[in-house]
Each structure stands twice: as structure tokens, then as C-alpha cells.
Image: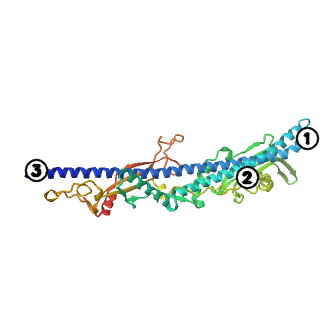
Amino acid sequence: MVLLVAVAATVFFMFNSGQLVQEKIRLTNTADAVAYSAGVFEARVLNYDAYANRAIIANEIAIGQAVALASWAKYAGTAADNISPYMYLIPYAGAAIASVLEKVRDAMDMYTPALAYSVSMHDAAMNALAASQLAVHGPGNVVATSSRMALMDAVAKKNDPDAKVDWSPVSDDFAEFTRLYSSQDERKRMGRVVDTSRDAFLKSRNWDFDDLVFNVLGCKVGPALRKRGSTELVDLTEGWKSMDTLSFHSYWLKIKWSGISCRHSETPLGYGTAFSDADMDDSAYGYAGSRPTNPRASGRADSSEGIAEGFDPEPSTVGGGAIPDFHDLSESALTQEEPRTSLAIRVTKESGKQRFSGGNSIIKPKGSLDLYQGAPAKNVSAAIARVEVFFERPDGKNPIHAKEEVGSLFNPYWQARLVPVTAAERALAQFTQELSLP
């Protein structure tokens, strides 16, 4: 009988221990699943921001292209209109050439309203993307963190209906990891990306025909054609404006008793301008030398007669083609060599809902068999897990420039992984449970 009691106590102790270990493993797995799911959620939020920012940049470039094509089309139309009267002076073929040039002018005037509509559509898409970012994050990232909490709670319930996730994480820096860039100076960060993404057509549309110009006594002498034009993102944030000009330049020298003077005259032939917003101050821009080289043609381009059809007074837009507010990493995150954010969470389960003698087990030993003391602190078991969200290209370095890329919200390469819990986080979790362990 004495041995029977001892054996029964031992068997019961092993059974209870096994049940508690099983409960602990289940709770630990639940914590890992909750933390990893939260990390994947954060990575998806960051990747969505990156895709949205890329789409905003693409739409911004598309607006620039539309404005550039409208300006160029208006320039081609005015050039055709101004040159066509002189074509009648050409025997036989002059009338036909003039007729073709007049058709070019009419075609250009029909083409530019479609480009103005394109500006409106791309601007609306761009601002819708910016609004979607704000909807995902909410003011101060409150929407993102609330959605993450709802996801963590749902994952915990799927793994263990009785498990609970602490509303206050053990550690969490996600809310401070990103921020909204809204002021003009802040939006220049994206503006610089857009500006450097301009192709050759946007940067310069220049050519010269000056083969008949010669240097005589230190002066240029002869006729020349000079085409100038470019498309600029004004102040890197406020919208696009484009200008194209073509002028006939005549150079000669004049001899006086007092000496030789070099003379020059400009005759505007073609000119055109287009913009996404009419109220921008572009006085600091020369448009690839248009204003200094073809000042008279540039003046006409800036006047009402030089504005492309559909762009006068301006296209109907939400933001005038300006860089919208957008989300990116915070300043502190951008200063990190390898930006990353982490989250540590605690999952608990009440003792009364665990299958051991001190919980909801139907086996309740009494008397001399009641030797197992397994009551946890605050009558709950707890497990903690930590996840880290980091940036890493799956193919290593940038394949075009062969350089390492630093994490930002312009590239969608954010990933999540479980990492060890730090000693400080473990101590904080233990303190929460009013427990101090070695």
C-alpha cells in the first residue's frame, strides 16, 4: 500500500508535468504564430507603401510626358502656321507644302486636349494612391496598429481559442518607423526621385542648324535655326511645365567710323507651352536654354497664344500635378545603416482553462496525493515572441547598378522573420506578471 501511494503520486506528477509542457508548447507556438503574422502584416504595409510610391512616381512621370508632348505639339502647330505662308513662294510645290503644314497645325490642336485629359486622369490616380496610403496608416499609424492588433487576436484564437494577446506589446517601434511627408520641403524627397527619372525627351529637346554661320572679324555672320525646350518639375514638388521654341537667328556685323559692332536679330517661328498648374512660379527655369537663347519665342510661348489647346487656363486636376503627401521611413529609420522594426508580444492563457490538476482537468487529487504545486503567477501561463521586419533584395545587389540598396519605401523588398527575445524584453514580460526569475 505504501509503494502504491508513492507510484500513484509519481505517475500523477509525470502526467501533470506532461500536460503543462504540452500547454506551454501550444502557447509558445501560438505566440510565434501571432508574432510572425504581425511581422508579415507590417511587411505588407511597408511593401504596399513602396508599390504605391512607385505608382505615384510613374503617374508623375506620365504627367510630365503628357505636358511635354502638349508643349511640343503646340510648338509644331505654331511653327507650321508661321512657316506655311512662306511656302507659297516656292514654285509648283509650295501650295502643297503649305497645305500639309496647315493640316499639321490642325492635327496638333486636336491632339493636345487629349493630353490635357491624360494629365487629369494621372493626377487623380496619383492622389487616390496617396489617399489609400493614409487609409492604411491613419493619423499617427493608428489604423495600421489597430488592424495589426485585430489580426494578432484572430491568429491567437485560431491556434488556441483560450489564448489572449496583450493589447500593449512588450516592445513595439512600428508606429515611429514610418511617417507622412506632407510639407513642400518634405515632399522634395520624392520630387528628387521623379526629377532624376526624367528621360532625355523631358530633359532637353534642343538642336541647332548653324552651318551657314561664320566668324568674320570676331563677329558671327549668317543665318541659323535654334530649337530649345525641356520639361521641368517646378520646385521639385509643385507640378510640371514645359516649353518649346524655335527661332530664326540672323547674325551680321556693322562697320562704323567708331569700329565694328556685332548685330543679331531673332524671328520666332515656333513656340508652345503646357503645364499641369497655371499658378506656378517658373521664373528660375530656362527650359534647356529656351529663354536665354530664344527670348522672343519664349515670350510668345508664355503668352496666351502659346498655350496648348486644353491647357488654357489649365487642366482640371485634384492637385495640379504636384507631388502628393506620401509615407516613407521616418528620419530616425533612414539614418540606420540597415533600417528595421521589431515587435515583441506576450500571449497568456488562464490556469482554469488549461488541462492539468490545477486547471480544468476532471482529475483533482486530494489528501496525500495533492503534492503538485503548479499554480503560475497571477494564475496565467505566458509566452513571448519577437519578430523583426527588415529590407533585403531577394536577388542581392541592384542588378543594374551593382550596388547595395538601403531600405526605404521606394522599394518593395520588406520581409519578416522571428528573432530571439532580448533580455530586457523578457524581464519586462516577467515584471508584467509580477514575477522575477533568474
Q: Residue at x 87, y 52 (%)?
A: 256
Q: Nearer the viewer, mark 2 or mark 1?
A: 2
Secondary structure, mark 3, is helix
Residue 397 in sight here: yes
Question: How packed is label 1: few (under 14 Cα within 10 Å), some, or many (20 or more)?
Answer: few
> Counting residues from the N terminus, which is met first, the one under dot 3 or under dot 2?
3
Q: CA distance from mark 3 to mark 1?
A: 126 Å
Secondary structure, mark 2, is strand
Q: Nearer the viewer, mark 3 or mark 2?
A: 3
Report x, y in % for residue 47: 50, 49
Report x, y in % for residue 197: 61, 47
Q: Nearer the viewer, mark 3 or mark 1?
A: 3
Q: Which mark is residue 89?
A: 1
**Looking at this rendering, what residue extends furthest in the left direction?**
2
- Picture quadrant of residue 187: bottom right
Q: Residue at x 22, y 57 (%)?
A: 374
Q: Which mark is residue 274?
A: 2
Task: Determine whether label 3 and label 1 are within 8 Å by CB.
Answer: no
Position of residue 129 in the picture relative to residue 114 (left or right):
left
Amino acid residing under circle 1: Leu
